[in-house]
Image (spheres, grey):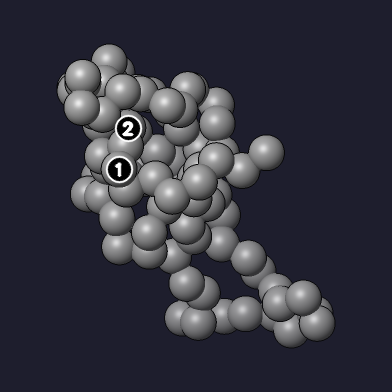
Amino acid sequence: MKLTPLADNVLLKSSEAEEKTASGIILSTATKEKSVISEVVAVGPGTKENPMTVKVGDKVITGKFAGQELKLDGEEYVICKIADILAVVK
């Protein structure tokens, strides 16, 4: 199934959460936090007020509770507004 966002919406796929800390401590699944770094999978055309400033393939940082989670073909995605994207990771 293909999903195309409308207006200033962006479809994101979350990166895997870290399995261990910088000091080497392995985290259990209960202590892992939701990843805020995601990859842009699809973008809408944007609007006059909110032009599209990211493209497919960009790695971006979003707010922890930004967007709407959805499951599509067994994969988990988040769809959010372009305004919910805080930064592009280079």
Crowding at mark 2 (Cα within 10 Å: few <14, some 14-19, many 20+): many
Q: Position of residue 77 (x, y in %)?
A: 35, 42
Closer mark to the observer between disc 2 and disc 1: 1
- Sequence-wise first label, 2 or 1: 2
| Foreground residue among 51 and 35 | 51
Q: Is residue 79 visible?
A: no
Placement of 56 over or under 40, stated as above or below: above
Quarter of the image that includes the N terminus: top left
Along the horizontal axis of the image, is 47 left or right of 78?
A: left
Identify the residue position indicated by label 1 in the image: 83
- Toward which corner of the image does residue 2 lie, by quadrant? top left
The CA distance from mark 2 to mark 1 is 10 Å
Quarter of the image that includes the C terminus: top right
Q: Position of residue 18 (x, y in %)?
A: 63, 65
Residue shown at 39% from the left, 45% from the top: 85
| Foreground residue among 57 and 15 | 57
The kind of secondary structure element at disc 1 is helix
Residue shown at 38% from the left, 64% from the top: 64
- Toward which corner of the image does residue 47 lie, by quadrant? top left
Along the horizontal axis of the image, is 50 left or right of 90?
A: left
Identify the residue position indicated by label 2 in the image: 10
Along the horizontal axis of the image, is 57 left or right of 19?
A: left
Q: Position of residue 76 (x, y in %)?
A: 36, 45
Give the amino acid type for the residue marked by disc 2 in the picture: Val
